[in-house]
Amino acid sequence: METIAMQSADIPWLVGGDFNTVRDLSEICGVSRDIRMAMEDFNTCIQNTGLLPLPMQGEWYTWHNCSAGPRNLWKRLDRMLINDRWMAQFPTSYYSSLTARTSDHSPMVLSGDIQQQLGGMFRFDNYLALSPEFIPSVQQVWQHNIIGTPMYAVTRKLKALKPIFREQRRKKGDLSHNVQLAKGFLEMAQVLVTSNRQDELFLQLEHCCRVVLAKAAKLEQIMLQQRSKMQWMKGDPGAVINEFVMYYQNLLGGERRRDMIDLRFLRPWARHILSEDDVNSLVLPFTHTDVKQAIFDIAEDKAPGPDGYSSGFFKAAWPIIGQE
């Protein structure tokens, strides 16, 4: 951080996250080990980097060890710090420490001088790819001709698909009602805990609400996926058989290309050596098959980038978008 501070002396700089330590003993509630040395190091670092605390609203303690017994512990581990250039450019900025949900840390939201009303962070849910509307929606957007570099055209089309997928997800019904109820129960339990942090009954209630919320969110995702699969398989007995086969293929793994190397050709004094064919294969131009294999090797729930689209989207839409 001190190295970055020297490089950021003339530009606005904000540092935020879980620093895993506190600045003062007032930022601890409960029995903790001796952290005076870590606390001193942290304060020295802040002083040497010339950082200042960004104004904060909301929860004071940002971390809880999720213990419902006498060992329960709260700390203020998460914060945002700024330099003087940030303060000069964004004088009214601040951050809010929100009530924790399923994590043991509180989310932090940065608010600046200009508030942009966005539609929330987009996240593609893989169950949408099983809907009959999925392929026609992608085809409708992908047929447009966009002037620009190939990567620019792809990103513009992906952006145009986001409101369509948002609307499809909204039409799936009220399956998220239980999740919203669980969030409400957790908020009420956390209000009780805040009023009396030493009451073990309140702590146990808050812990149970966290578990219920996590399970409800997971169950919601599973139900949506299964509902889409059943709609897709309805009226097609062969699809049921294929579903079982695909399940066990994914479970046991697919075919993998293996290049056999004859160890007899290795020099006795060499630990590792590549054959001439192996060397040539490393510099071959990549093919469409290589690109497809790289994409399809990624787990469906993984996101290759920060745009909210999972790998499952690219796999399901590959017949349309793969060439581009």
Image: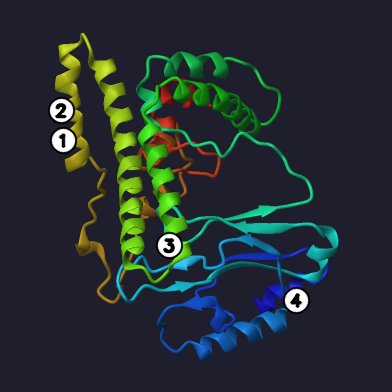
Coloring basis for residues: rainbow
Identified at 44% across, 50% down, the residue is 188
Specify whether 23 is left or right of 84: left
The Cα atoms of the two marked residues, 3 and 2, are separated by 47 Å
Residue 244: numbered disc: 2
The Cα atoms of the two marked residues, 3 and 4, are separated by 43 Å
Q: Which residue is mark 3?
A: 193
Q: Nearer the viewer, residue 71 or 120?
A: 71
Q: Is residue 158 above or below residue 263?
A: above
Specify whether 65 is left or right of 107: left
Q: Say if mark 1 contacts mark 2, CB within 8 Å.
A: yes
Q: Nearer the N terminus, badge 3 or badge 4?
A: 4
Q: Nearer the viewer, mark 3 or mark 2?
A: 3
Q: Say if mark 2 contacts mark 4, CB within 8 Å.
A: no
Under mark 1, the amino acid is: Tyr
The Cα atoms of the two marked residues, 2 and 4, are separated by 59 Å
Q: Which residue is mark 1?
A: 248
Q: Looking at the image, can residue 253 be seen? A: yes
Q: Which residue is mark 4?
A: 6
Q: Is residue 28 above or below residue 226?
A: below
Under mark 3, the amino acid is: Val
Q: Nearer the N terminus, badge 1 or badge 3?
A: 3
